[in-house]
Image (cartoon, rainbow, N blue to C red):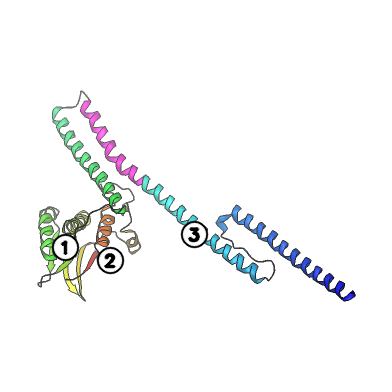
């Protein structure tokens, strides 16, 4: 009987020690969780007060949940910052031509303005309105593409043919700016699977971008390499720096801090989305004195 009592007392103290150890661990865990909730930016993790396999497993699982929530919080904050910046850029892009239009309307209404001046102001208003229309169109198109609401009709496209058409379309504009244009196309016909209308839009976007920034020379190259159809656009590097390349295809990036070049910075973003939707790839690099944009598709 004595041994039974001693055994029960030992078991009691063992259970009591286990209970108090567990209670202490739970209390410590609760305090740690309160600190984490109060200061989530510190990215702390729960630590077991004593070595207990099951408790360590439990805390490891809770830490996984905290880590996932922390990542979601960081992603949300980054997206929120990006949205604010994009709203600011959109507001600026819309406000600038609108302010100009209102200013010239006021001048037209001024009784001291001459008829010849009114006609000139109307031309400027029309030009600014078209710029504004272009901005709104770009915003709308980007929204449709990101929502997967853009129709694509993929077919076999003759690359040299569409490149030649685009080059001829803008030749006179390059000539007016005294920019030397070269078009180097592979002799063997090249074909890719793409939506011809959207491919034409991509190429137009890239040529317009080159027309905006080229100073002396612009070159289009097309060739087949390792089963890939490659299209390259070369224009003057200008003030472009290596560290700017990672932002080239970002939304609203113009490479112009003043944002006064009548560009939303959406042209290259839209081009990238269109290329990738048609299973192609697009990239940018600096090659000596030239800024190069390269497109690539599987050759047919």
Q: CA distance from mark 1 to mark 3?
A: 41 Å
Q: Earlier in the sequence, mark 3 or mark 2?
A: 3
Residue interval drawn in magenta: 88-113
Mark number displayed over residue 286: 2
- At x 25%, y 42%, the residue is 132
Q: Residue drawn at (58%, 62%), measured in percent from left and top?
A: 62
Query: Looking at the picture, does residue 53 appear above or below residue 68?
Result: below
Residue under label 3: 71
Check disc 1: other Cα within 10 Å, few if <14, some if 14-19, many if 20+. few
**Residue 155 - label:** 1
Marks 2 and 1, Cα distance to the nearest angstrom?
32 Å
Dividing the picture into quadrants, the one containing residue 222 is: bottom left
Q: Residue at x 16, y 64 (%)?
A: 220
Question: Is 142 left or right of 231, judged from the image as shown?
Answer: right
Q: Position of residue 284 (x, y in %)?
A: 28, 64
Which structural element holds mark 2? strand
SS at badge 3: helix
The reply to whether dot 3 and dot 2 touch (C-beta < 8 Å) is no
Around disc 3, counting alpha carbons within 10 Å, would you say few (fewer than 14), some (14 to 19), or many (20 or more)?
few
Pair 2/1: label in front: 1
Q: Quadrant of the C terminus?
A: bottom left
Q: Which mark is residue 28?
A: none
The answer to whether mark 2 and mark 1 are in CB contact below 8 A is no
Numbered disc total: 3
Q: Is residue 214 visible?
A: no
Neighbourhood count class around disc 2 (C-alpha, 10 Å): few under 14, some 14–19, many 20 upward: some
Q: Nearer the viewer, mark 3 or mark 2?
A: 3
Sequence-wise first label, 2 or 1: 1
Q: Residue furthest front?
A: 1
Residue 249 within the magenta-colored segment of the rendering: no
């Amino acid at each position: 009987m004595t041994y039974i009592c001693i055994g029960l007392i030992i078991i009691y103290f063992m259970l009591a020690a286990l209970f108090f150890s567990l209670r202490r661990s739970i209390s410590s865990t609760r305090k740690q969780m309160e600190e984490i909730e109060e200061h989530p930016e510190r990215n702390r993790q729960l630590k077991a007060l004593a070595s207990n396999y099951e408790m360590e497993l439990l805390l490891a699982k809770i830490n996984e949940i905290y880590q996932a929530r922390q990542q979601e919080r960081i992603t949300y904050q980054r997206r929120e910052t990006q949205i604010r910046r994009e709203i600011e850029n959109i507001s600026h892009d819309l406000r600038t031509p609108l302010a100009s239009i209102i200013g010239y309307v006021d001048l037209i209404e001024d009784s001291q303005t001459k008829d010849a001046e009114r006609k000139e102001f109307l031309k400027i208003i029309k030009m600014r309105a078209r710029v504004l229309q272009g901005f709104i169109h770009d915003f709308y198109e980007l929204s449709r593409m990101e929502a997967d609401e853009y129709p694509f009709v993929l077919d076999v496209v003759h690359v040299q043919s569409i490149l030649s058409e685009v080059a001829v379309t803008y030749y006179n504009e390059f000539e007016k700016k005294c920019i030397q244009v070269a078009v180097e196309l592979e002799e063997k016909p090249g074909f890719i699977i793409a939506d011809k209308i959207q491919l034409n839009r991509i190429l137009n976007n890239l040529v317009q971008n080159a027309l905006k920034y080229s100073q002396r020379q612009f070159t289009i190259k097309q060739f087949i390499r390792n089963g890939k159809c490659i299209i390259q656009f070369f224009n003057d590097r200008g003030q472009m720096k290596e560290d700017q390349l990672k932002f080239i295809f970002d939304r609203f990036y113009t490479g112009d801090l003043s944002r006064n070049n009548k560009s939303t910075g959406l042209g290259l973003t839209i081009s990238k989305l269109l290329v990738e939707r048609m299973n192609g790839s697009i990239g940018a690099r600096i090659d000596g004195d030239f800024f190069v944009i390269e497109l690539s598709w599987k050759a047919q």
